Image (cartoon, coloured by chain):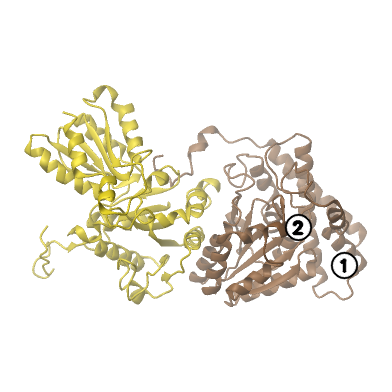
Chain colours: A brown, B yellow
Amino acid sequence: MTAIKSRVSPETLVKIFTTATKIKLYDETYRATIRAGKIGGMYYPVGGQEIIPSSIGEVLNPDDYVLTIYRGIHDMIAKGVPLTTLTAEFFGRVTGSCKGKGGPMHVTDVAHGLILTTGVVGSGMPIGVGVALSAKLRKSGQVAIVNFGDGASNIGAFHEALNLASLWELPVVFVCQNNQYAEYTAYSLGTSVDSIAKRGASYTMRSVRVDGNDAEAMYEAASSAVEHARKGEGPTLIEAMTYRFFGHAIGDSMGYMPKDEMAAARAADPVTRLRTNLIESGALTEDAAAQLEADIKAEIDEAFEFAISSPLPDPSDSTTDVYAEGVAL
Amino acid sequence: MTAQVSTPETEPQAERVRNQVQAINEALDIALGLDDTVFELGEDIQDPSGGGFGVHKGLSTKYGLERVRPTPISEQAIMGAAIGAAITGMRPVAEIMLMNFMAVSADQLINHAAKLRYMSGGQTHVPITVRTATGGGGGFGAQHSDMLEGPLVHTPGLKVVVPSTPADAKGLLLTSIFDDDPVVFIEMHHLYFSVSGHVPEGDYRIPLGKARIARTGSDVTLVSWGRQVHDCLAVAENLAADGIDAEVLDLRSLVPLDAEALMSSVAKTRRAVIVHEAVRRNGFGAELAATISEELFGQLAAPVRRVAATNTPVPYSPPLEQAHLPSRADLEATVRGLF
């Protein structure tokens, strides 16, 4: 699809493309590194969902908060968490963001506003309410973005959190990244409503369903939601439609995902689509795009090198950070 | 304790006799007054009732509904909101009306509050205080009476406090609120109005992890917390009449545990009986008994004994509930059996 008249500035779209490319190439590199047997552990691929956080990232301030889930590397990268410490954390290295104590499902990087990653589906939403409450009580002007999947909207905590956020008019944006699968189960097998955005009405919450793979639509939705939040006009629920290209976790055979559905989704790869649009609209040349991709790939390779060559934690560190210093275990 | 309250003008050293509800109310009032990052959230905590037991009476009027914040009946949201606020600079004091309802919010408490400092490598911490009331003997039945300190002390990252006196309730609560770790503060509601005593004025704090010797003795150590401390004291008087001199150790906080006080008392008396209201199986008493046996095996004059509730849900009908709960008679018989 050729952009006829861009509603979002070309500069912003190039930035979104840059972040999305970083996520896409990082995800590819991570999967390749596992396949090559260089690292073990779990990995929850994000390929296909790059545009959502890349667009949100362009409307956030550095001190705004992001909360994400185990499938969250895209949200982490888009918030500006350095690839070096992020990768080292995934690899369990002492140089990781959390000194190797968190791992892929529990990354925190306070300095870059990544305040929580949870490995428990649906748990981030109540905590996001508290983060936003804190911002409101401190009058800091900060906004909290809470990311989760379509499956998480079936958990009670989702409903408790939306009710409270709406009741207290908190500066929080709930971003449901609807990739149409809750782990290994299709949306329709687990969800009684045809759109998660409709659930916002139960809590008189501003709610919007948007094509999360369309950078302009996603940017506009995020921009509006964050603006409302910052002005004290309360929360928004964004249902960002997307698709998961590589199944639930690394090694997923994806037998439950129809092949034609997958083929169509991959043919409409959102990062490729944005790249094409930017080149066709003249915002980016083919050479510039290729250079950008090469630079990003080099940065990613460097981060993986850093992580692989970093030392593992000292076993004695397993007993620290349980309590404040000086408290006996 | 006498119920006489003297005016400070005439007798500055006079006892300030308060019950536990009043003591907790004082602590909350002082904490809210001291620090703008302290706020309360919970069900029904606003005036005029100020909570189911009146613990918050006057506080929402004094500090406003922004800081004494009523919530819907949403335990996951209450706990989650407290955690989110805590990792971003606030000191929330959350109330989970009754301890059994903590099971509803367990994901937030056990998977998040307890673990975030660790999982983040120390970048975030969760200075929340979760106050909750519970206890048997009230005829509330199985879903409103449980003592669930066992699973909490079994969760690294949490601190667990159970006060037995009004003064301890005040001093331990103020310390808990200003502690940088998540503290579950268990209030045995039987004690809310039944026990009064002197409560020091002002910002009075008692450190966590410091047990209190409630009665000094030389023949046996009765180890307990909360309501059962009073049972131990009463039984100790009966035993004294027969020449058995019991020491009563009130642990006050289970995590951190004052292992030093525990070991030095049992090393002295060479006998220990642990009393708790939670069910016996896998109760904290089992952990204490094991620790005492490991540390003092050769010095003990008798096996370490436990007196606890039977391994059933808390029954409703009074004779059933009494049969379930640990009684003073059980305790007394157990102690006598050691000699």
Instruction: Name the residue furthest top.
Output: B298
**How many marks are shown on the rendered structure?**
2
Residue marked by disc 1 = A283
> Horizontal placement of B233 versus A77: left or right?
left
Q: Is residue B117 visible?
A: yes
- Numbered disc in front, either 2 or 1: 2
Q: Which residue is mark 2?
A: A49
Q: Which mark is residue B297?
A: none
Asked if the residues shown at circle 2 and circle 1 are in contact, with their CB atoms under 8 angstroms apart, the answer is no
* Mark before the other along the chain sequence, 2 or 1: 2
Q: Residue at x 63, y 39 (%)?
A: A93
At numbered mark 2, what does the secondary structure look like: helix, strand or loop?
loop
Looking at the figure, which quarter contains the C terminus of chain B? top left
Q: Is residue B188 left or right of residue A112?
A: left
For disc 1, the chain is: A
Q: Quadrant of residue A146?
A: bottom right
> Residue A226's spot in the image, x, y percent?
65, 71
Kind of residue indicated by mark 1: Ala
Question: Which residue is rendered at x = 85% and y = 55% of the image?
Answer: A266
Q: Residue B32 appears at what percent x and percent y?
A: 36, 67
Question: What's the CA distance linking mark 2 and mark 1?
Answer: 23 Å
Label 1 crowd bin: few (<14), some (14–19), many (20+), radius 10 Å: some
Residue A106: give x, y in percent of width and height: 60, 49
With respect to residue A250, does B48 lie above or below? below
Residue B178, visible in the rendered structure: no
Find residue B299 and report its image quarter: top left
Q: Are marks 2 and 1 on the same chain?
A: yes
The image shows residue B113, relative to residue A94, as above or below, that is below
Q: Residues within 10 Å of mark 2 (few under 14, many from 20)?
A: many
